Image (cartoon, helix red, strand yellow):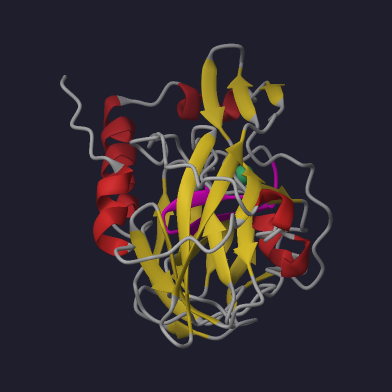
């Protein structure tokens, strides 16, 4: 199949036209990370050819877990409409490889029937429509609220490449928190429920769109307390923790997409000042901004998000 390549810089040519690079505003972030540009009273931000609103006057640039290492042009528009350009350098992250044995009771998730396979494919198509998020104004601030009353440390499982029963590969693009069954699962921010359904792999799932391209997803719930179209408030109960779908035991799976990018949810539960930030150092002021070399911002893949 021939691949149509669209140059990122062409997209930026229309988006960022007329911009002047005043200094080398550079930030480095790992795959699955989020970079930040603060201190300029931002109104809007741009990356990957997309323009979107700042959050509390700060720009954030999400990096998909599979974004190729390289440089991407970023933009910040301040409150006077003045455009500032910078460069986001994506570094390769080392993700753990984990081998897991699934009990026989979960065999259907490794060897699904034809019906189950077509069910999963249909669900995936439905999910793909909402993962890009809406362009509505941001209904969230950072850090996000915690999705459970107490959030035990996850096992640094974001990004792990799982191998089930030595033959079935799966990329873990969220985090698993060992929360007790029956505990309330809470919305991490205000938003609109865009999907609430029982899915083959993810079990009972709730997807909330928080505006500005941010979507949170909660999987393997025991019960669901909301329905698609509901407006929810930060801290509102979405359901209870369970082990539905392909889960070896009760836990809360949280995934986050921002501008469609799969990012480590734990990063947004922390103080945002800990995120890598654009530096405007004089030492680098004369360095030329690198053009985005990667035609594709990331490799889309249809890996199941559980
Ligand atoms: Zn998970």
Query: Image height check: is 148 above or below 106?
Result: below
Residue in view at x 46 percent, y 38 percent: 304
Which x, y percent locates residue 35? Answer: 62, 57
What range of the chain is rendered magenta?
249-263
Query: From where the camera sits, is residue 290 visible?
Result: yes
Which x, y percent locates residue 229? Answer: 34, 79
| Prevailing secondary structure of the magenta residues | strand
Q: In the image shown, does 282 or 45 lie closer to the viewer?
A: 282
Query: Image height check: is 273 above or below 54?
Result: above
Residue in view at x 61 percent, y 11 percent: 166
- On the rendered image, what quadrant is the N terminus found in? top left
Which x, y percent locates residue 215? Answer: 47, 64
Q: Is residue 198 left or right of residue 276?
A: left
Residue in view at x 83 percent, y 57 percent: 152
Q: Is residue 92 left or right of residue 260?
A: right
Residue closest to the far front: 286
The part of the image, by quadrant, that contains residue 273 is bottom right
- On the rendered image, what quadrant is the C terminus found in? top right
Q: Is residue 209 magenta-colored? A: no
The part of the image, by quadrant, that contains residue 146 is bottom right
Q: Is residue 262 magenta-colored? A: yes
Give the quarter the ligand 1 occupies: top right
Label count reads 0
């Amino acid at each position: 199949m021939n691949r149509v390549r669209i140059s990122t810089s062409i997209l930026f040519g229309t988006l960022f036209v007329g911009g002047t690079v005043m200094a080398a505003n550079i930030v480095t972030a790992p795959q699955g990370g989020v970079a930040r540009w603060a201190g300029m009273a931002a109104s809007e931000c741009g990356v990957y050819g997309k323009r979107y609103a700042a959050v509390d006057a700060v720009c954030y640039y999400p990096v998909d877990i599979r974004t190729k290492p390289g440089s991407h042009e970023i933009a910040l528009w301040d409150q006077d409409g003045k455009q500032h350009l910078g460069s986001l350098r994506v570094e390769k992250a080392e993700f753990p490889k984990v081998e897991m044995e699934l009990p026989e009771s979960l065999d259907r998730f490794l060897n699904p029937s034809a019906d189950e396979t077509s069910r999963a494919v249909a669900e995936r198509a439905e999910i793909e429509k909402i993962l890009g998020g809406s362009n509505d104004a941001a209904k969230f601030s950072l850090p996000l609220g915690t999705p459970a009353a107490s959030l035990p440390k996850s096992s640094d499982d974001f990004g792990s490449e799982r191998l089930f029963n030595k033959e079935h590969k799966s990329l873990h693009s969220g985090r698993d928190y060992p929360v007790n069954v029956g505990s309330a699962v809470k919305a991490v921010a205000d938003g609109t429920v865009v999907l609430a359904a029982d899915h083959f792999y993810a079990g009972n799932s709730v997807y909330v769109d928080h505006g500005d391209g941010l979507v949170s997803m909660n999987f393997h719930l025991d019960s669901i307390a909301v329905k698609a179209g509901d407006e929810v408030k930060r801290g509102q109960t979405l359901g209870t923790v369970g082990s539905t779908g392909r889960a070896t035991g009760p836990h809360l799976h949280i995934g986050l997409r921002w501008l469609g990018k799969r990012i480590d949810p734990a990063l947004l539960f922390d103080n945002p000042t800990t995120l890598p930030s654009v530096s405007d150092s004089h030492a680098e002021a004369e360095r030329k901004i690198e053009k985005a070399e990667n035609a594709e911002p990331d490799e889309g893949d249809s890996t199941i998000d559980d």
